[in-house]
Image: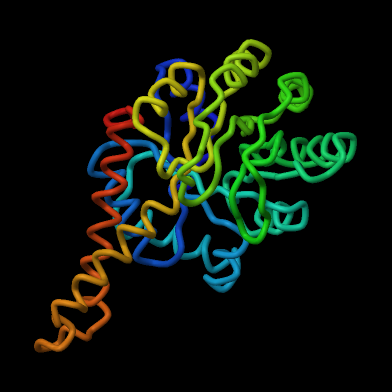
Amino acid sequence: MLVSAKEMLTKAKAGKYAVGQFNINNLEWTKSILLTAEELKSPVILGVSEGAGKYMCGYKTVVGMVNGMLEELGITVPVALHLDHGSYEGAKACIEAGFSSIMFDGSHYPIEENVAKTKELVAICNDKGMSIEAEVGSIGGEEDGVVGAGECADPEECKMIADLGVTMLAAGIGNIHGKYPENWAGLSFETLDAVQQLTGDMPLVLHGGTGIPEDMIKKAISLGVSKINVNTECQLSFADATRKYIEAGKDLEGKGFDPRKLLAPGADAIKATVKEKMELFGSVGKA
């Protein structure tokens, strides 16, 4: 059964580890992530961007697939199904479809409007026992067509949004989505520390977990980051394994063209990436 991310993240913040949000793109992704979480006894958050939701035939299809898998695979660890970078309309649609958690990204609205819309969604989520993530200061890189440069959030604005009763807060600390450029300046731990001082027990979220050096990830966790989002890294490992399978001519041997065989190396590569991240984040055995 899907659960809100609140309890797993409160525990993570207190225990100084982080829960990974792994974005799903299809059946292989979802299955690989769930099996790895179960094997490592780690809580997990399945992230769905609006683009991926559309690609998978809508939020109801996603909810049906995930709920079916939880049952069929006998998953016992806590699993949250979370809308990633949701618009106001997207958030409403996911609440309706049966997600257990949403992110409302109001970072591009004037702060007053961000506050008003966040308040309304917090009330609905509280009523339904769902968790809600808010964002302050845009995360750099490209996420479904929204391009940002990796700004740092204003700690006072973070406190203002945190005080509206959101479950978790994504604050821009110089992190970006996708691959990091050569001239990337690194994470701003000063910003993170200032946000943590003002928001107290609130679990903080680090977007763009792909490509941040391990020591920076560990330092961010020590400063209150309890949820780290990973997407690009799984995509790269899936593509790499699939490329190798085809380049080795395996799809031409016997029934190697069968999608179950063709996609298996990629699915295994996702599992390996997820395992590596769960070990780094410290969530193994914390279910």
User: Can you say whether 261 is above or below 31 in the image?
Assistant: below
The image position of residue 101, as x and y in percent, is 59, 44
Q: Quadrant of residue 259?
A: bottom left
**Of the pair 116 and 205, the residue shown nearer to us:** 205
Residue at position x 65%, y 44% in the image: 149
Residue sitting at the far right: 112
Left or right of 260? Residue 184 is: right
**Of the pair 48 and 148, the residue shown nearer to us:** 148
Q: In which quarter of the image is residue 200?
A: top right
Residue at position x 28%, y 64% in the image: 240
The image position of residue 75, as x and y in percent, is 32, 48
Residue at position x 45%, y 44% in the image: 182
Left or right of 261? Residue 224 is: right
**Of the pair 209 and 228, the residue shown nearer to us:** 209
**Of the pair 172 and 226, the residue shown nearer to us:** 172
The image position of residue 214, as x and y in percent, is 34, 31
User: Can you say whether 70 is above or below 7 in the image?
Assistant: below
Residue sitting at the far left: 254
User: Can you say whether 259 is above or below 272 in the image?
Assistant: below
Residue sitting at the far front: 183
Task: Look at the image and name its color scheme.
Answer: rainbow
Q: How many labels does the image show?
A: 0
Quarter in which the C terminus is drawn: top left
User: Can you say whether 22 is above or below 155 in the image?
Assistant: below
The image position of residue 134, as x and y in percent, is 68, 36
